[in-house]
Amino acid sequence: MPRYAPNKMPLSVKKRYFDLLREGYKGAAAARVVGVSASCGSNWFLDAGGMVVPDVPVSSRFLTQDDRIAIADGLHAGLDVKEIAVSIGKSFQTVYREIKRGSKPEGRYEPFWAHNQALLRRRRPKDVKIAASASLRALVRHKLTERWSPQQVSRFLARTYPEDPAMRVCPETIYRALFAGLLGRPAGMLRTRRTYRRRQRRGVPNPSKIKNMVLIHQRPLEVNERRTVGHWEGDLIIGRGQASAIGTLVERATRYTRLIHLPHGWKAPQMRNALITQTVDIPAELRRTLTWDQGREMTLHKDVAALTGFEIYFCDPHSPWQRGTNENTNGLLRQYFLKGTDLSRYTARDLHAIARQLNHRPRVVLGDKTPTEAMRGWLTPAMTC
């Protein structure tokens, strides 16, 4: 059998060799299957620092051996890190960290060595660093009693002990130790005064997510230009103790406002019924789009769209600026509906009167016209009163 240099064979051959080892093949048998000498396979084995078999399957969130081979191929071809990241579907920060952490001491990135090292780092159970070091534990506890956050403690340790890894921990380690009782009673040690760890749901679908949402990024571009009417933004104003609410609709181009009476609450069925019945007088050509946040009150948005003609779009989470017109209008409405007020005491007639007053107030953004004047010619006389 011809002899081959250990690093001249394609990475695909080396990958097959290590896959066979993980399947239980002996080194010589695996080398024979892939067509190399036993000494060549031994050199590969030693260069990779051995071979680790994970006890449990590794989540797809983490880099796989194939990903690391692709990184090595990309580096050998002279590709930019960002190009490599796109090719494997990961962020370029992940690839940068992998190259820095997975390179051998001489600076060479060897994918099989990097993969084994990653599997070794994942082995469980691991010793809890704070539990093993009395000095580290005392220092972290002292800083927490001084009202430092875990992030501040972690940065302090990194600055103070740059050459001593045993005296450095990440914020997550501090949180885990705190809630495990290794740092004393957690009560009062955190700004939030939380005494337990919230359940982590990474990778688990959020049951509160509204189904079949169409996000704002798919909304027609003409809506952003405000050159045509009929594009509305909506939200809720919540009353005292979250026991009452009023719906607000504002037209983007004219700032014309409608208030939605919600005497029976604002859960999805009540919200659907109120929107359908209280927008029926708006001409169909002026019911083009409606943009809302991801509140659960719009769970039945498909029914609303089907019965009103609105095309409904949803903002990104925690992005109120994507409904800037509505947010500004809600601020103006707080002159009438003070925070902490019981909103259930307002009747539909009250809301109509308040909306009428607001729509007859001149706006600088409209050239000192009122929303009613800006909308006149588009709405029926009954709506512009």
Image (tube, rainbow, N blue to C red):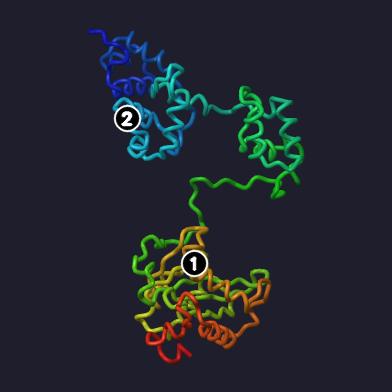
Q: Nearer the viewer, residue 60 or 259?
A: 259
First along the sequence among labels 2 and 1: 2
The reply to whether discs 2 and 1 touch (Cβ–Cβ < 8 Å) is no
Q: Relative to residue 87, is residue 293 drawn left or right?
A: right
The location of residue 305, given as percent across then percent down, is: 40, 73
Badge 1, how many Cα within 10 Å: few under 14, some, many 20+?
few
Q: Residue furthest left?
A: 2
Amino acid on which the number 1 mark rests in the picture: Gly
> Tag 2's secondary structure?
helix
Q: Nearer the viewer, residue 126 or 25?
A: 126
Where is mark 1, residue-wise?
324
Amino acid on which the number 2 mark rests in the picture: Gly
Residue pictured at 33% horizontal, 30% vertical: 70
Query: Which quarter of the rendered picture does the N terminus lie within?
Result: top left
Residue pictured at 45% horizontal, 81% vertical: 279
Where is mark 2, residue-wise?
74
- Count all numbered tags in the image, as a single digit: 2
Residue 65 placement: quadrant: top left
